[in-house]
Image (tube, helix red, strand yellow):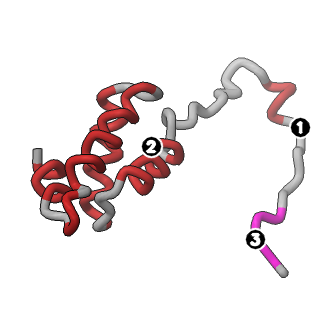
Amino acid sequence: MFLRRLVETEPGGLGTREFIRVLRLLDGCSWQRLQDAVEHALVIGVHDADGIRLIVEHLPQAPVVLCSLDGRPKLRLVDAGRNELSARR
């Protein structure tokens, strides 16, 4: 409800429309995912539907599960090398 009060104070009466646009994001994601995105958006000061949509799209889906090599001694010998992850221009 905090988001609703916040967006309804927008000048020009566009806040209700923005709040409805945020609720329409439920067409493509779960309630929990939208709630997490809205909470994150409020922390960083975003309260428009487009910003919240971007957060929904870019929040991590699930934690990365590491592959255990227990019981696979041959795989421990494989060297995949190192990748350069820094961005250089």
Q: Pointer 1: what residue?
A: 78
Residue position for label 3: 86
Q: Amino acid at mark 3?
A: Ser
Name the residue at 44% across, 53% down. 50
| Of residues 50 and 13, the one drawn nearer to the viewer in this rendering | 13
Q: Which corner quadrant of the image does residue 76 belong to? A: top right
SS for dot 3: loop
Which amino acid lies under the numbered mark 2 shown in the image of this protein? Val
Q: Is residue 4 above or below residue 77?
A: below
Left or right, 59 with respect to 22, comes to right
Work out which quarter of the rendered image holds the C terminus and state it. Answer: bottom right
Examine the rendered structure and indicate whether residue 35 appears above or below residue 88.
Answer: above
Please report whichever mark, 2 or 1, sits nearer to the chain's N-terminal start.
Answer: 2
65 w.r.t. 50: above or below? above
Q: Which residue is mark 2?
A: 56
| Above or below 14: residue 70 | above
| Residue 41 x %, y % | 32, 56
Label 2: few (<14), some (14–19) or many (≥20) C-alpha neighbours in 10 Å: many
- Between 18 and 64, the one lying in front of the other is 18
Q: Which mark is residue 24?
A: none
| Boundaries of the magenta span | 84-88
The x, y position of residue 45, in whole percent, is: 28, 67
x then y, percent, for residue 30: 37, 25
Q: Is residue 73 left or right of residue 50?
A: right
